[in-house]
Amino acid sequence: MANNDSKSDELSASIQSVAPLDARLQVVVRLQNKAARALHYVADVRATRYDPATRTLTLALSDEGREVIPGLAGRLPLFRHVDPGSEAEIHLSVPDKIVKLSRSAGSVESGELAFETQQLSDVREVVVEVAWADVPYYHDTRASSLQDARLPAARWEQHKARATKRQDKKRPPKA
């Protein structure tokens, strides 16, 4: 859908703050447009991934890698733009815990389902990936290839601006 005339470093991202607030984690991301034209980006969290081993939280503002679920209505992301030579801020809010289906549980057929809760209060590192393109998103009315099963916003995306912030929290000593 989009052309590839833009350079991947024309939009940069930096995480300004990460703070807990009312059972949520608040993340402020600043985008800087170094291009001579407006750049368009996804402005809401499309996927939340947490790695408990490294305590890394990844907030993906991108549909890349997300699966199309047949028969389910897909909601498009929120798109915004940043003017040439200027900055924009994105305020993200995610729950301070993730509840997901446990991989160690039995199968659905056996009726043995288990869930695991991952607390985000001990996050060591936050990564934000912002999908962007140098053209606005529009619904492509052309017939799509059966080979391309990506979501429409993933086909639009040209680049990702990536920012990382390491949390400098000191853990209380264990009693």
Image: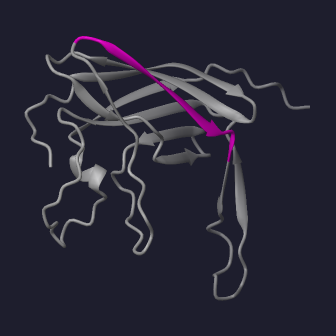
Q: Residue at x 65, y 65 (%)?
A: 102
Write down the quadrant of residue 36 in the picture: top left
Q: Left or right of 140: which side holds 46?
A: right
Q: Is residue 92 covered in magenta? A: yes
Q: As displayed, is residue 150 above or below residue 71?
A: above
Query: Measured from the top left, where is residue 70 in percent x and y?
Result: 39, 74
Q: As displayed, is residue 74 above or below residue 18?
A: below
Q: Left or right of 72: which side holds 161?
A: left
Q: Left or right of 69: which side holds 105?
A: right
- Residue reaching furthest to the right: 175
Q: As displayed, is residue 37 above or below residue 119?
A: above
Q: Residue at x 20, y 30 (%)?
A: 8
Write down the quadrant of residue 66 in the picture: bottom left
| SS majority, magenta | strand
Query: Measured from the top left, where is residue 62 in percent x and y?
Result: 37, 44
Colour scheme shown? one colour
Q: Nearer the viewer, residue 64 or 165?
A: 64
Q: Left or right of 77: which side holds 153?
A: left
Q: Residue at x 45, y 27 (%)?
A: 164
Q: Residue at x 74, y 36 (%)?
A: 23
Q: As displayed, is residue 63 above or below residue 142?
A: above
Q: Is residue 40 covered in magenta? A: no
Query: Measured from the top left, where is residue 127 in percent x and y?
Result: 47, 33
Span shown in magenta: 85-97
Write down the quadrant of residue 40 in the picture: top left
- Residue reaching furthest to the top: 85
Q: Nearer the viewer, residue 77 or 169?
A: 77
Q: Quadrant of the C terminus?
A: top right
- Residue reaching furthest to the bottom: 109
